Amino acid sequence: MSRRQSSRPSSAASYSSRSSTLDGELRLECKAAFLCLFDDLSEEITSKEDLISALQQTGRNPTNRSLTKYWTRDTRSLTFDDFVHICKKEPVTTADDLMKAFRKVDLNGDGYISLDELYKLMTTRGERMSKSDVQDIIEEVDENRDGRLDYREFCNMMISTAEDCKKLSLKVMEKKERRKQRRGNADDNRSVTSRRDQGPHDYPKPSPRGKRDLKPAVSSRSSKLSEPRNLREWTHIRSNGCFFLDQEEGIVSHKYQLYLPTASNVWITIHPIKIIESAPVPEFPIDTALFILKNKKLVTFTEQRDSKGKYGVRGDLEAGKYTIIPFSTGCRLKVSNHRNKQEAKLVKTDRDDKVVITKVFRKAIEELFQLSDLDGNGLLSRQEFNMFNLRSSGEEVADDEWNVVEENVELEDGEITKKGFIRLNEMEAEDNGGDAEDLWVTLTSHGFNKNLELDQACPYKIDVYTEECDDVEFKVTGIEPLSDSLNDYVCESVMAKGESSNSRDKRDILLHTYIGETRATVVAENKSRSPVKVNVDCSGSRNCSSNIDTLEPTVTVPANSTAIALHLMPEDERSDWCVKCE
């Protein structure tokens, strides 16, 4: 007798399906939280503080006792899989958990929590908080200003804050993945094909495999930049770099690492330079600045400037590693209209029907070589060629690719000569059969227009002087959009050094305005629990130009967060300028 098979899944199969779904959701949640703190899942958590931050991004706030189980005295680092395992064990803080904890703290059972009661709770669960921090929390949610909280409302606020953190983490992760996909997705099929069918020249192409469309107060900071008198006796190290304009990512720049083996007095400057003949000379210098970070925290930034456009900062720095990120507002470095530009010819065929590059393209390649020679020694190291390739294609130079370069082009002391760099581009043109499309993508990604003028980039020079420290290390570590690495620190600097005022029509919005000698920045701070659109009116300003071609921007500020509204600079530095925003 045959048995009819049920179309319904068994309870075990149903449980397995639900379990698999929950595990997938948890892993996605953990991935989003992890990528809020790190650039890649291959990185590791190297401190207890970073572990706490990552857990809080998932809505978890473990006790100190719980943390000691995950981060012991012997723990040096945790991988992403370790983090997922911890999240499986550590439950998300729920409203019921908070309610139970608050009832224990509410000693008289009156349904309210006083400052002293809340302080006791906040110093026994999760990260320790100061009494002033707890006072700030009470003031933020204490609507009737009686100095105590209805704990049920406070629980709801805590839970909604955790959900906001998770939503923000997902947005950050999606943004990073879209950028990676944009850089690498279109490259996959073609890169495989190009390696298989490269033809006569087997070398890493400098051009990208995937295409990219690049197309009221008056400043009182009048102190001018002046260098130390005995600067010639200090240890000096330098590097060039460049701001590049990208229509999708905004301003892109090199970033650096400074290592001081001992504490020292330092003098660090940045200024725009002209290393390429085709680069136009602006009437007023393009603004540059430096933000100096340690352990992902802002240490200082350049404020003073001399008449030639050099910004600098002097101070005492402790021993250790520092991240140095160049910055420009974009008020003077803007996308140009190329529609009226005549397109230069890059390649042609000679009498023997062989593809050769033109004289104007050869000159542009030489200028591109100068732009990529960050240490100015007339050669391209592997690191410098890697930075060039990252900007061209979004890809790093693999070991096998560099080996091919070493075997096929002229080198000097293990570095690419100008002649070798030109030869790489000649071979590129030959292998493409005279098709100049890839060559143009390389040029435009580095700031050249169709007439081979460098008007979409700004080269700069960074000088580091140390008074007491001799064995200084200063090196380029990457190239990335400024919005990814700097927005939060710019907001922090403005809030620390600027003046604050209430928004004219938004109760929970503060406007912070920093006015330096030659630049100003307005930051909107949202203290509410919901995203808010803020209208900023700077139309009353005088002799000002902005980075976004308007003095009346509208900016969306996430809940309990900040956002840059706009940057301002004087249109004419020879005249007084006035910043007035509300």
Image: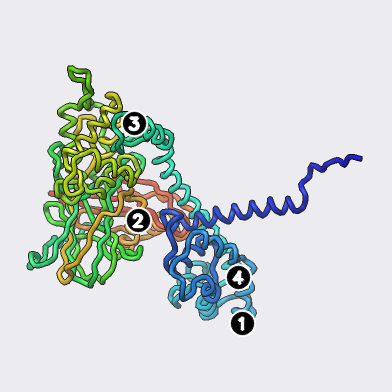
Name the residue that disc number 4 marks: 98
Which callout, 3 or 4, points to the residue nearer the camera?
3
Residue 397 percent across, percent down from the top left: 32, 45
Task: Kindly identify which numbered label has been placed on residue 107.
Answer: 1
Q: Image check: 557 left or right of 517?
A: right
Q: Position of residue 315 (x, y in %)?
A: 20, 69
What residue appears at the point 23 percent right and 44 percent down from the top-left corner? 332
Q: Furthest residue to the right? A: 1
Image quarter (top left, top right, bottom left or bottom right) of the N terminus: top right
Distance CA(mark 3)–CA(mark 2):
51 Å
Q: Amino acid at mark 3?
A: Gln
| Residue drawn at point x = 13 percent, y = 65 percent | 235
Tag 1 or tag 2, which sits nearer the N-term?
1
- Amino acid type shown at disc 2: Val
Q: Do callouts 3 and 4 mark residues in contact (Cβ within 8 Å)?
A: no
Q: Is residue 296 above or below residue 411?
A: below
Q: Decide which of tag 3 and tag 4 comes sooner along the chain.
A: 4
Q: Residues within 10 Å of mark 1 (few under 14, many from 20)?
A: few
Q: Which mark is residue 179?
A: none
- Distance Cα–Cα, label 2 vs label 1: 42 Å
Q: Which residue is mark 3?
A: 198
Mark 3 or mark 1, whichever is nearer to me? 3
Query: On the picture, is 500 further left or further right than 223?
Result: right
The reply to whether residue 248 is visible in this rendering is yes
